[in-house]
């Protein structure tokens, strides 16, 4: 086992606060969000009815995915009914440019590009954050969204490298035991990254081979590339007067180890850390600790709305799980997927939303 004990990620062992059913959040103004998939085929009247129901049931902001044309419709509706609206768009996974610009994509330690060898699943076609062309593409895309009437901000997702280590509960799905970094999941070793790094530090990271996992300088350099890219996007978005938020991994420590995402250095207005406890074999104590850790980090710096997976939450109950988040410092929560709430789910959600 390497010096970083990845097993500990699955079961955080520090002290936990307010993880039981007896916790009750302070009475304060909450702000709850929903990640929303689809809806493009609905009429404007149907969309308005759906978004009106969200607001009436205690949702304050929506994070829908879709095209710019769809966002034009959503923005108009949200402005009318008073919902905050951030356009949810994947950041580093952009498969649409592979035929024209295959050189924009990430390469693993085996020298394999995601264009021909996507890791884990077919849609994992990761851009390289070190390339100027990628930077320009993403800045232009996100700032173009800011011209949409009724849009309050943009929302980044998959704003990271590929999973060098999967969350522990997901590894069996791929017949993997990832107690170390495997070369086929270790990115990025493209010509741009290698040449930039060699110019700065005097050696080619590809030559590290099995020692790559232990080279903290090379690890930090890649973290820095993504931080610089995200903060340039944020700067451009802020110049338009709009906000920027992101879905990130549960804590900065987990994010750095699993997906090379140093999100505590992102200059964002709000964070939705995906506290999907089932993925880490976690429970409510795990959730409480993660939320408490993030709340202390983000207090006074940015909005903090932990991301909750509806399927994970139902086994404990929506009211109970939200109470744990609020009691440990969350300013509200973000649910995925918001489109799949049942009538029973909404009844539980409203108990908290209107407390």
Image (tube, rainbow, N blue to C red):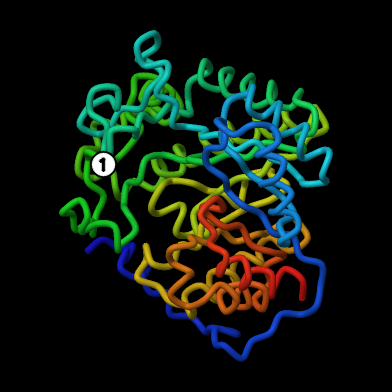
Instruction: Please state the horizontal and vertical placement of residue 77, each as a whole percent of the image.
Output: 76, 36
Disc 1 secondary structure class? loop
Farthest bottom residue in view: 22
Q: In the rendered image, which quarter is residue 239 located in? A: top right
Q: Is 111 displayed left or right of 252 in the figure?
A: left
Percent across and percent down for residue 164 are: 32, 46
Residue 350 appears in the picture as rendered: yes
Q: Is 353 rendered above or below residue 99?
A: below
Q: Position of residue 197 (x, y in %)?
A: 41, 28
- Which residue is at the front of the view, 309 or 223? 309
Q: Residue drawn 27% across and 31% down?
A: 118
Residue 257 as seen in the image, left or right of residue 234: left
Nearer to me, 183 or 41: 41
- Crowding around mark 1 (Cα neighbors within 10 Å: few <14, some 14 to 19, many 20+) is some
Residue extending furthest toward the top? 100
Which residue shows up at 43% across the image and 46% down it?
A: 260
Is 177 placed above or below 244 here?
A: below
- Tell me where residue 64 appears, x and y as whole percent: 60, 40
Q: Quadrant of residue 116?
A: top left
Q: Look at mark 1 in the image and give the residue it sits on.
A: 120
Q: Residue at x 40, y 73 (%)?
A: 282
């Amino acid at each position: 086992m390497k010096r970083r004990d990845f097993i500990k990620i699955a079961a955080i062992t520090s002290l936990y606060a307010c993880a039981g059913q007896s916790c009750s959040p302070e009475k304060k103004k909450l702000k709850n969000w929903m990640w929303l998939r689809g809806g493009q085929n609905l009429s404007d009247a149907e969309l308005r009815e759906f978004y009106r129901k969200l607001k009436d049931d205690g949702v304050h902001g929506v994070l829908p995915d879709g095209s710019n044309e769809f966002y034009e419709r959503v923005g108009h509706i949200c402005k009318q009914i008073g919902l905050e609206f951030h356009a949810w768009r994947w950041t580093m996974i952009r498969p649409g440019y592979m035929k024209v610009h295959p050189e924009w994509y990430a390469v693993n330690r085996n020298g394999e590009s995601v264009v021909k060898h996507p890791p884990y699943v077919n849609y994992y076609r990761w851009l390289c954050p070190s390339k100027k062309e990628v930077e320009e593409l993403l800045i232009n895309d996100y700032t173009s969204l800011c011209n949409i009437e009724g849009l309050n901000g943009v929302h980044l997702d998959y704003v990271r490298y590929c999973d060098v280590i999967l969350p522990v509960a997901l590894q069996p799905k791929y017949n993997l035991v990832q107690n170390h970094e495997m070369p086929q999941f270790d990115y990025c070793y493209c010509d741009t990254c290698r040449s930039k790094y060699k110019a700065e530090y005097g050696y080619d990271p590809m030559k590290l081979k099995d020692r790559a996992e232990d080279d903290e300088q090379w690890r930090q350099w890649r973290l820095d590339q993504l931080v610089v890219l995200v903060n340039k996007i944020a700067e451009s978005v802020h110049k338009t007067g709009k906000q920027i938020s992101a879905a990130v991994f549960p804590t900065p420590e987990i994010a750095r180890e699993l997906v090379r995402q140093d999100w505590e250095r992102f200059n964002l207005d709000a964070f939705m850390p995906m506290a999907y406890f089932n993925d880490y074999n976690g429970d409510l104590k795990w959730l409480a600790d993660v939320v408490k850790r993030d709340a202390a980090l983000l207090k006074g710096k940015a909005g903090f709305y932990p991301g909750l997976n509806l399927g994970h939450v139902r086994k404990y109950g929506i009211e109970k799980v939200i109470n744990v988040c609020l009691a440990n410092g969350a300013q509200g929560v973000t649910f995925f997927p918001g489109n799949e709430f049942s009538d029973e789910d909404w009844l539980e959600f409203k108990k908290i939303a209107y407390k």
